[in-house]
Image (cartoon, rainbow, N blue to C red):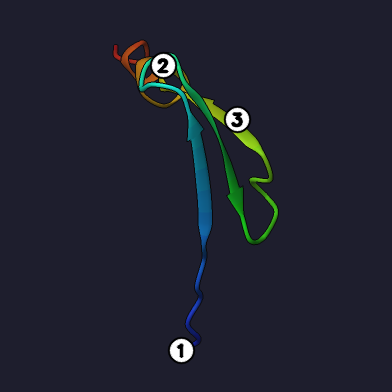
Amino acid sequence: MAVIQRTASATWRGDLKAGAGRIDSTSGVLAGTPYTFMTRFESALTRRS
């Protein structure tokens, strides 16, 4: 079976709650995708039923 290896990197600027970052992957599919504390953690709290 072939081995598939995926890599990505993230950068973060600022403190935990007020900062923001970008995600990149070697495939380019995530090129410069922005994220924040809210998009990563707080939005998940609103999805509870």
* Mark 1 in CB contact with mark 2 (< 8 angstroms): no
Q: Is residue 47 left or right of residue 25?
A: left
Q: From the viewer's side, name the closer residue of 48 and 25.
A: 25
Q: How many numbered marks appear?
A: 3
Q: Residues within 10 Å of mark 2 (few under 14, many from 20)?
A: few
Q: From the viewer's side, name the closer residue of 14 and 48.
A: 14
Q: Which dot, 3 or 1, sits closer to the camera?
A: 3
Q: Which residue is mark 3?
A: 34
Q: Which residue is mark 1?
A: 1
The residue drawn where x is 70% and y is 54% is 28
* Three-letter code for the amino acid on which mark 1 is drawn: Met
Quadrant of the drawing holding the C terminus: top left
Q: From the viewer's side, name the closer residue of 49 and 6.
A: 6
* Mark 3 in CB contact with mark 1 (< 8 angstroms): no
**Furthest residue to the front?**
14
Q: Is residue 12 left or right of residue 45?
A: right
For marks 1 and 2, the one nearer the N-term is 1
* Three-letter code for the amino acid on which mark 2 is drawn: Ser
Between the C-alphas of marks 2 and 3, the distance is 15 Å
The correct choice, above or below, for 49 with respect to 36 in the image is: above
Q: Which residue is mark 2?
A: 43
For marks 2 and 3, the one nearer the N-term is 3
Q: Which dot, 2 or 3, sits closer to the camera?
A: 3
Q: From the viewer's side, name the closer residue of 48 and 29.
A: 29
Q: Secondary structure at mark 2?
A: helix
The residue drawn where x is 43% and y is 16% is 38
Give the image quarter of residue 45.
Answer: top left
Residue 8 location, x and y as percent?
53, 55
Residue 27 location, x and y as percent?
67, 60
